Amino acid sequence: MEQFTIEKLYNLDETIAAQLFEGAVYPWELLPKIRDFIVALGKRLPKDTYTEIKDRVWVAKSANIAPTACINGPAIIDEEAEIRHCAFIRGNAIVGKGAVVGNSTELKNVILFNKVQVPHYNYVGDSILGFKAHMGAGSITSNVKSDKTLVVVKYGEEKIETGLKKFGAMLGDNVEVGCNSVLNPGTVIGRNTNVYPTSMVRGCIPEGSIYKKQGEIAGKR
């Protein structure tokens, strides 16, 4: 499971939340801590760069927020981020520098690193998306198992009990997810991996891969 650690998945220079990752091994360990971290960090943000536009919602002055977007706290919208028409941020969300949250996209308990794009009809819940990760139109994270049992991360014969009921997906830096794909609970995708459109993904996908379908994963050349 070493290739699915924080160190292997993310460049922590590309998030305002880098301090949250300190002392953790796997990124899903951070999901229960996002809310409190945002509240603590928000209070320390420089007022010449960020404005608390409503209770526990801090927005960089250079961010572009559509008037039809709904942002509930706690949340931090970093510099030059774009929150488009009818985006819905339910709370516990960090949107990184230059990131795009698009039309009818919903976020809940997430960290989006800098330059992440979730631009069209996406649901991202209980997830962490690395630098320049991109989710195609209609692709979503499924964050609760149908039987409501706790999520287990699986890679081959290896298993890690997370103790979490809600766990969407961990996407490494530069991951590309094709349109209308579903990332099942506990999905972890390594850096620089591409997922074919309309895919149903579960488990751990190695970095530098092309995911075509379950059981058919090719390495990039």
Image (cartoon, rainbow, N blue to C red):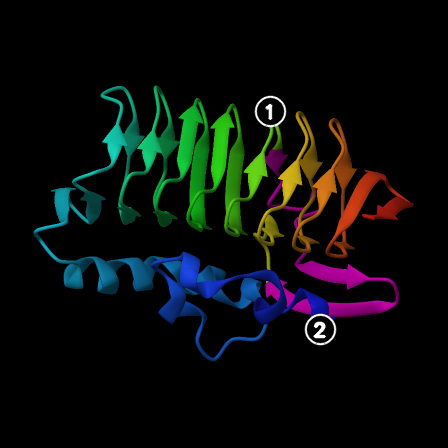
Q: Amino acid at mark 1?
A: Gly
Q: Which residue is mark 2?
A: 2
Q: Is residue 54 left or right of residue 12?
A: left
Name the foreground residue: 61 vs 213. 61
Q: Amino acid at mark 2?
A: Glu
* Label 1 element class: loop
Residue found at the very far left of the displayed protein: 48
Q: Is residue 204 above or below residue 89?
A: below
Q: Is residue 45 above or below residue 22?
A: above
Residue drawn where x is 77% and y is 36% of the image: 200
Q: Residues within 10 Å of mark 2 (few under 14, many from 20)?
A: few
Label at residue 94: none
Total of numbered circles in the picture? 2
Name the foreground residue: 72 vs 206. 206
Label at residue 138: 1
Magenta residues? Answer: 140-163
Tell me residue 19's x, y (percent). 36, 70
Spatial CA span between label 1 and label 2: 31 Å
Residue 145 belongs to magenta span:
yes
Tell me residue 160's x, y (percent). 72, 69
Residue found at the very far right of the displayed protein: 215
